[in-house]
Image: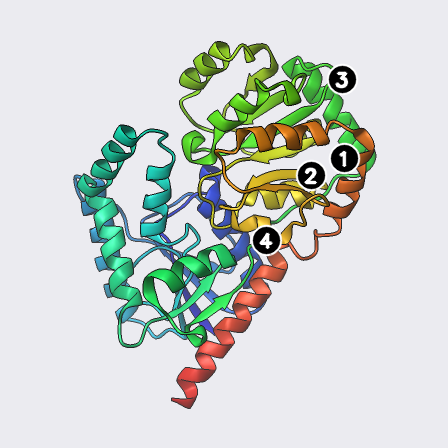
């Protein structure tokens, strides 16, 4: 089977969608397809995977993306493919997998991160004036309202609902393939060693309860809400490790204003976060919008209880009170603080850690790639019969 995989950029160090794509492609090629990646730029290669970089042209983000989809379309038209798999809006494909969620839904949730009417209005206007955002929404709308739309593979029911509400696609046009991650678990001695080293390095007491936040978009991921929860009486004594790119200075000032800066550690962006997960007792992500958070899936795979929101598709694999807690909204700061309070109890954390570790096979990228490959075969079989 000959597969073209379309993605704007391919650099696993950028995290998120691109790291997920690299893990997926690594597993996919082991299943037999001939895999070709069509991208603007790439900082990754793999034996057996053909990466075609089309380059960047244009003065603005919108011009560059428009140039990419035009050249990708030309590249694909000149060669025979069994499957054209796109993870970002494009001109045409046989399978569309919106790893970042539906564009318009994401834009609306971005507006929701603003806490007052004026700020929400300004962000809404900003999105209307953003030429690339308008282009992405337009391309996705055209792709999913065609007479013969591609099969849409969603990473969660959260995204399935977005597709159903906006595009009214029939069930036969959609498949749910829950997201996956590639995680190599550490044994108990390795975890204990990493826990001790990291806590000493970042200045956290060995017996203090520690939460970890991992994410590059601090506002959308709800970092301010975590800081607010730490200021609540129920979460007194909790420390917070923050990994990711973002306006750290703004959040440091906010933590100082809340009088919790002494319990917060801004650690910047890290290529690997495994040792830091080991140093923590819980992973916290009060996100405003996540199709299926890799952070939560990685933490669960490592046996770390999690707190996330109903706006995160990854919460669908969690049982509330067994693998952690799912709060209704990132604005529910009291609920977040109360969840941390419940996880202060060591036997509770141990029980949840044992339960989350059992999810590891289901959360694997190998399982995810095998299910996507099954959809490939289904699509290819349809084309042969047609």
Determine whether the residue tagged by mark 3 lies in a helix, strand or loop.
loop
The mark nearer the N terminus, 4 or 1, is 4
Q: What residue is disc 1 on?
A: 349
Dot 3 surroundings within 10 Å: few (below 14), some, or many (20 or more)? some
Say which residue label 4 marks.
316
Nearer to me, 26 or 138: 138
Secondary structure of the residue carrying tag 1 is helix
Q: CA distance from mark 3 to mark 1?
A: 16 Å
The Cα–Cα distance between marks 3 and 4, rounded to whole angstroms, is: 33 Å
Mark-to-mark CA distance, 4 and 1: 20 Å
- Provide the residue designation for mark 2: 305
Reply above or below: 373 against 297.
Answer: below
Q: CA distance from mark 2 to mark 1?
A: 7 Å
The disc, 4 or 2, on the residue closer to the chain's N-terminal end is 2
Q: Is residue 113 left or right of residue 197?
A: left
Question: Whole-Å distance between the Cαs marked 4 and 2?
Answer: 14 Å
Across and down, in percent, residue 336 comes to 59, 31
Task: Look at 29% across and 59% down and name the residue there.
Answer: 140
Circle 2 Cα neighbour tier, 10 Å, few/some/many (<14 / 14–19 / ≥20):
many
Instruction: Tell me if label 2 and label 1 are in contact, CB under 8 Å.
Output: yes
Q: Secondary structure at mark 2?
A: loop
Residue 270 vs 48, above or below: the answer is: above
Q: Which residue is mark 3?
A: 206
């Amino acid at each position: 089977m000959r597969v073209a995989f379309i993605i704007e950029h391919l650099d696993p160090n950028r995290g998120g969608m691109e790291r997920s794509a690299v893990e997926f492609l690594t597993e996919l090629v082991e299943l037999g397809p001939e895999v070709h990646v069509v991208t603007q730029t790439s900082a990754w290669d793999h034996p057996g995977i053909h990466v075609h970089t089309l380059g960047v042209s244009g003065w603005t983000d919108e011009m560059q993306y428009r140039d990419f989809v035009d050249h990708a379309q030309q590249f694909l038209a000149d060669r025979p493919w069994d499957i054209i798999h796109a993870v970002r809006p494009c001109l045409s494909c046989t399978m569309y997998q919106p790893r970042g969620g539906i564009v318009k839904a994401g834009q609306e949730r971005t507006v929701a991160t603003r806490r007052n009417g004026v700020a929400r209005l300004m962000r809404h206007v900003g999105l209307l004036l953003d030429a690339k955002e308008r282009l992405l929404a337009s391309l996705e709308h055209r792709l999913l309202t065609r007479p013969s739309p591609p099969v849409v593979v969603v990473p969660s029911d959260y995204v399935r609902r977005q597709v159903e509400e906006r595009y009214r696609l029939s069930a036969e046009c959609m498949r749910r393939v829950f997201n996956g991650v590639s995680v190599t678990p550490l044994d108990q001695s390795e975890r204990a060693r990493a826990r001790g080293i990291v806590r000493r390095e970042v200045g956290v007491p060995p017996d203090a309860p520690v939460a970890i936040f991992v994410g590059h978009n601090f506002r959308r991921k709800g970092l301010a809400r975590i800081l607010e929860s730490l200021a609540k009486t129920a979460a007194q004594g909790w420390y917070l490790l923050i990994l990711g790119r973002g306006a750290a200075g703004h959040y440091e000032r906010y933590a100082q204003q809340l009088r919790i800066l002494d319990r917060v550690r801004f650690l910047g962006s890290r290529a690997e976060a495994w040792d830091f997960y080991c140093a923590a007792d819980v992973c916290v992500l009060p996100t405003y919008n996540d199709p299926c958070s890799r952070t939560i899936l990685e933490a669960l795979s490592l046996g770390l209880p999690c707190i996330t929101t109903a706006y995160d598709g990854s919460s669908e694999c969690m049982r509330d009170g067994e693998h952690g807690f799912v709060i209704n909204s990132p604005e529910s700061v009291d609920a977040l603080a109360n969840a941390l309070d419940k996880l202060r109890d060591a036997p509770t954390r141990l029980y949840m850690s044992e339960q989350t570790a059992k999810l590891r096979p289901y959360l694997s990228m190998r399982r995810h790639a095998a299910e996507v490959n099954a959809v490939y075969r289904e699509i290819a079989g349809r084309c042969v019969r047609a």
